[in-house]
């Protein structure tokens, strides 16, 4: 049985992840969404939606487009009727993490109307097709009409490329053998990969050891037990 990791406070002073275009990991599974971002302003509609599982790069793509379009960014749950005019003042807006449980339907409907009236631009990110879960008929109709670019789950090659970026964001020069070991032993999702990289980096800091395959082998059984 592997030795248990020590539990102690670790202060993580790493740099926030880079959301620049050159640091986006492009792959076939996200090609359609990336193409939509890069094709702007040649869009089929004033508003588009990017959908995909957690951790697959929706926020990164949103940041790339926001930089191009000088757009403001807001979480869907933070949308309020009184703020809509200010949010669209620059002519472009990103609404992230759209979820029926976290947004007022009438506010979202008014936002879509305002985008059309002002000929502004809107990028929405969500985990699922945007119309699912909403009850207001006019809103559902509007959402169903929006162009959607879907991001598929990552394959092993993309997960490995993402792992290198996640480690680099934390200042870790990851060994290819260790990265391959991780990717073949964790849940096959970008979100699980991000959590595992964070756990491994925190463990390395706590133990004052480098991030190695041996440390990963020691950590992974505990990660599985704790989750």
Image: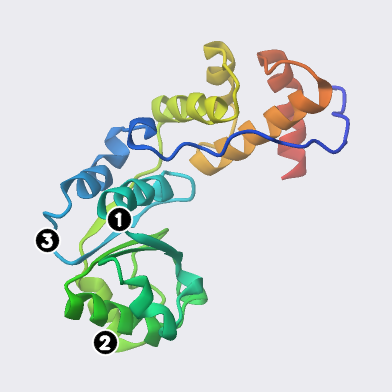
**Could you tell me residue 122's position as x and y percent?**
27, 65
Q: Quadrant of residue 74?
A: bottom left
Q: CA–CA distance between discs 2 and 1?
A: 29 Å
Between circles 2 and 1, the one closer to the viewer is 1
Crowding at mark 3 (Cα within 10 Å: few <14, some 14-19, many 20+): few
- Residue 44 is tagged as 3
Q: Which residue is mark 1?
A: 70
Quarter of the picture containing the C terminus is top right
Drawn side of residue 149 relative to residue 158, left or right: left
Sequence order check, earlier mark of 2 and 1: 1
Q: Nearer the viewer, residue 38 or 177?
A: 38
Q: Secondary structure at mark 1?
A: loop
Quarter of the picture containing the N terminus is top right
Instruction: Name the residue: 40% across, 32% down.
Output: 155
Q: CA–CA distance between discs 1 and 3?
A: 20 Å
Instruction: Name the residue: 21% across, 69% down.
Output: 120
Sequence order check, earlier mark of 2 and 3: 3
Instruction: Name the residue: 56% across, 12% down.
Output: 175
Q: Which residue is mark 2?
A: 138
Q: Secondary structure at mark 2?
A: helix
Drawn side of residue 162 relative to residue 12, left or right: left
Crowding at mark 1 (Cα within 10 Å: few <14, some 14-19, many 20+): some
From what the image shows, is residue 182 above or below residue 194?
above
**Could you tell me residue 103's position as x and y percent?**
47, 77
Q: Quadrant of residue 130?
A: bottom left
Q: Secondary structure at mark 3?
A: loop
Sequence order check, earlier mark of 1 and 3: 3
């Amino acid at each position: 049985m592997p030795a248990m990791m020590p539990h102690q406070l670790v202060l993580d002073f790493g740099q926030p992840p880079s959301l620049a275009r050159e640091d986006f990991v492009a792959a076939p599974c996200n090609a359609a969404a990336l193409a939509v971002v890069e094709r702007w302003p040649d869009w089929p509609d004033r508003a588009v939606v990017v959908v995909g599982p957690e951790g697959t790069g929706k926020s990164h793509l949103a940041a790339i487009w926001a930089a191009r379009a000088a757009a403001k960014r807001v979480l869907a749950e933070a949308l309020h009727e009184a703020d809509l005019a200010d949010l669209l003042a620059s002519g472009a807006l990103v609404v992230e993490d759209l979820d029926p449980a976290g947004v007022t339907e009438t506010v979202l409907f008014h936002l879509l109307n305002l985008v059309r009236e002002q000929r502004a631009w809107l990028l929405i990110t969500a985990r699922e097709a945007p119309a699912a879960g909403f009850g207001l008929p006019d809103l559902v109709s509007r959402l169903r009409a929006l162009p959607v670019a879907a991001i598929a789950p990552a394959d092993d090659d993309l997960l490995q490329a993402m792992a290198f970026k996640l480690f680099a964001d934390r200042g870790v020069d990851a060994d290819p053998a260790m990265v391959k070991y991780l990717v073949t032993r964790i849940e096959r999702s970008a979100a699980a990969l991000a959590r595992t990289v964070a756990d491994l980096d925190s463990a390395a800091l706590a133990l004052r050891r480098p991030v190695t395959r041996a440390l990963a082998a020691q950590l992974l059984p505990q990660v599985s037990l704790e989750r």
